[in-house]
Image: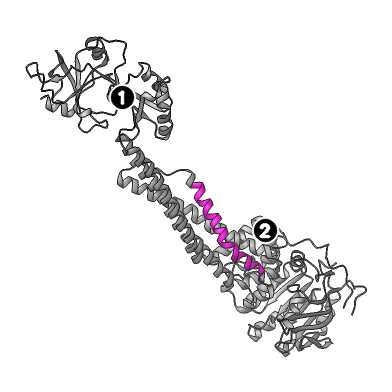
Amino acid sequence: MGELRAPTGGCVAPSRLRHLDAWRTALSGIRSRSTRSLLSSLGIAVSIAALTAILGLSASNQADVLADLDAQGANLVVVTPVAGVDGEAAELPSSAPAMISRMPAVESVAVLRSVPREVHAYRNDLVPAGESNGLTVAAVDPGYFDAVGAEFGQGESFSEGGRALPEVVLGYEAARLLGVDQANQRIWVGSEWYAVSGILDPRPRVAGLDTSVLLGDVWAEQRLWSDHDASHIISMTMRVGAESLDTVRRMLAPTVDPSNPRTVSVSNPSALVSTRAIVDDSMSVLVAGLAAVALLVGAIGIANTMVVAVLERRGEIGLRRALGARANHIARQFLLECIVLSGVGGLAGWAAGAVVVGVATTVSGQAFVLPLYSAGLFPAVAVIVGVLAGLQPATRAARVPPTTALKAG
Amino acid sequence: MNGESIEAETVLELAGVSRSFGGAVPVRAVDNVSLTVRAGEIVALVGSSGSGKSTLLALMGALDVADHGAVRIAGHDVSGMTDAHRSAVRARFVGFVFQQFFLLPTLSAVENVALGLLYTGTDARTRRSRAALALERVGLGARLAHRPSQLSGGEQQRVAVARSLVGEPSLVLADEPTGALDSVSGARVMRLLRSVAGAGTAVVVVTHDREIAEALDRRIVLSDGRILSDETRRVDAAHAAGVGCLPEPEGSV
């Protein structure tokens, strides 16, 4: 046994590979088997494209469904006084509409006020008092129709001045029953003639509007009521930003009547709100599930390519080791190849997915919605998945003893 | 052989080196081998197949680690080194030539040769210019941009020789360098290797070709992992005369 110097060889610096050269080496590795690299990149691209398309389509679809639901009144909240034990509805404070308007996320408040019980609507003054057709007579402000999203089929809402005049807006069914087919005709309400300023479209979002005869609130207050202190509020309907719906609903009763919140009933005009929540959730679950499957498929593709590459390129691994590559240079080379393959695949896939979403939404006439974060997140996820998939093959490549690798070559 | 003091021109020194493989009943592929190779020497390592030539070559080039004994390359004992340091010794002091050439098919000749400097941290421009010079040296200065597939077998092996030389190593280890070549190309590669040795680099050629071995100055015969004989004789007087007047090898310590 030779007595040689201390076995550290301290005067030799470890072999090194420049960062730029490491990337070049990875790229040349990819070029050396370009078809297979392209295919494995394509695998990732397809899965990311699928993911992007799913996200974009479901987001576009969801936006569409939600807009549709909102159009149907899913974001309309109705506040009514609670009926007491005597069957009489409690009186809501006159300040209530103003208080509600001040709440954040409440876009507009439509107040429906009662008229005295004996006031009914008739085609003309000759119709017997009993034949009121079950029509509801109530009073509103001119902004009411906008607030509840009611559309006019004929004419328009009474003007700000019309609030204080004998003008009336008829629900579609009410107009039919009263024999009115166009604006400016007259009907008999209570004990006076009223001019019809507009007729609403059928199937409004607020229940009962179809059979309503709506007078101006100022007129009703001044001419029909003798009791001017009461608010005569039947209901307040407001449009609320979808994201604050729950909060607003919780806060409404104490806002309307701080001293007596129990007399206030807060409801939605329909069950659409729960549908909205379900739509919101189910889409997210679907997207997450499909995303996981798509990415798994992509990862298997990358792992497969790398496992084969390591087997095929043992000779090259041996050569590089002979040329002075350290084990971790080899591992790094394969990992960088994974990063390039999956990163390129991820970016290309995102772009392809965005195109799919663009085409599909154009064809279906929906709005294009693709969350911007996906442009960074998906390629990043692809790279992470690619690295995880390549970790084992890369480590294995690094562990092959140089002599074994050279023999295999 | 046990070197209390290493002569300046000693490039490779093996002292009592052994290497075994296998599990329960290990096979001793290299058994207590001691030898020294000096700068400018060209050595044939011969033996029947399974005699341990390739294992010994791997030990000489720090591709493998001996179970026992010490291997010193250009003054660096690689036995206890980490992978990083051993790799550095290969990158700086050892050039390999293989029977299968191991040229990367997508790279041009000059790029393949430049790979020989990749792990030394040399910048790309320098690597390329030195690779071009190395190709000139092996007579392929006009073939820089050719892909391996555009070169004959003999030319490919000369590219591989250029790659082994580009780092100006102290030691070139050639494993059956003519094994895949016809006799004319093989003879040309051997002439090239002899000229490399003539320029002051130590060259060890593993071969089972008796004719090639006979043509080299020194022959070490291996059998069952042991040195059977180690003979030196001047084969080519004209060539041998040139050795003394060549410069000292770069990189030797």
A104 left or right, relative to B203: left
Q: Which mark is residue B124?
A: 2
Question: Which residue corresponds to the image point at 76% horizontal and 71% vertical from the top-left?
Answer: B94
Name the outermost residue toward the left.
A126
- The quadrant of the picture occupied by the N terminus of chain A is bottom right
Q: Is residue A365 above or below residue A323?
A: above
**How far separated are the C-alphas under marks 1 and 2?**
93 Å
Relative to residue A406, is residue A166 drawn left or right? left
Colour convention = one colour
Chain to which mark 2 belongs: B
Identify the residue at horizontal 51%, vertical 51% (top origin): A379
Residue toward you, A212 or B86: A212
Classified by dominant secondary structure, the portion drawn in magenta counts as helix
Secondary structure, mark 2, is helix
Image height of B217 relative to B8, above or below: below
Foreground mark, 1 or 2, reads 1
Residue beneath disc 1: A85
Q: Which residues are magenta?
A: A375-400
Residue B139 seen in the current view: no
| Image quadrant containing the C terminus of chain A | bottom right
- Front-most of residues B214 and A162: A162
- Kind of residue at badge 2: Ala
In which image quadrant can residue A149 be found? top left
Q: Is residue A401 above or below residue B32?
A: above
Disc 1 element = loop
Q: Nearer the viewer, residue B188 or A117?
A: A117
